[in-house]
Image (spheres, rainbow, N blue to C red):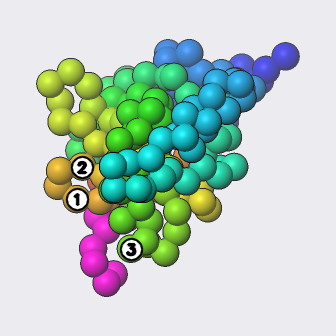
Amino acid sequence: MPDLNSTRFPVNVDAALREAGWQPGRWDIKRAEEWADTLRAHVSPGGHRHHVFPAVVEAWAEFGGLRVTAPGPGRQIAPATLHFAPLAGLHLARTLADLGRALDTELAPLGEEGEGTEQRAVLAMDIEGRVYSIDHSGDWYLGQDIDAALATLVTGTLPTRLVAGG
């Protein structure tokens, strides 16, 4: 039986995840593998391909398909609405490859933030499990793993902007 009193996430993050349909032990590896196959098979017009690795497949298996909305106002900025939909980044293989090269790692799409008329950003994970957001205003570091990134996004904590050479 899953632990219904999880202490893995801060209370408001846990509440937002549960409202979205997450619970401890959630795991849909079949769907995650389907996303992996689709991303691996896609080649951009410029010949760019997606990277797929265990950390991102595990994140897709646990959170894939969820739409997470923060339960309240943010600490420093408006909290993000998240959709864990890796195929939202299907046509961004070059963008992710370029950022991955700058960070000396590989990136894979994780989903997106924003919905409706709200400006969207792509969420990406690197091979070590670190999470980033890429939008029209720049590239952002959200956390050293999916849990930290969720806390940043759902609580409205200001993420760290990535800057060239730093």
Relative vertical location of residue 25 with respect to residue 53 in this rendering, above or below:
above
* CB under 8 Å between discs 2 and 3: no
User: Where residue 11 appears, x then y in whole percent?
Assistant: 53, 31
Residues 154 and 27: in front is: 27
- Numbered circle sitting on residue 115: none
- Numbered circle sitting on residue 102: 3
- Find out whether residue 165 is within the magenta segment: yes
Amino acid at pointer 1: Gly
Relative vertical location of residue 17 with respect to residue 106 in this rendering, above or below:
above
Q: How far apart are the two marked residues, 2 and 3, measured between alpha carbons?
A: 16 Å
Report the span colored magenta.
159-166
Question: Which residue shows up at 55% across the image and 54% down it?
Answer: 51
* Badge 3 element: helix
- Residue bearing the label numbered 1: 138
Return the disc, 2 or 3, that comes first in the chain's sequence. Answer: 3
* Badge 2 element: strand
- For marks 2 and 3, give the one nearer the viewer: 3
* CB under 8 Å between discs 2 and 1: yes
Amino acid at pointer 3: Ala
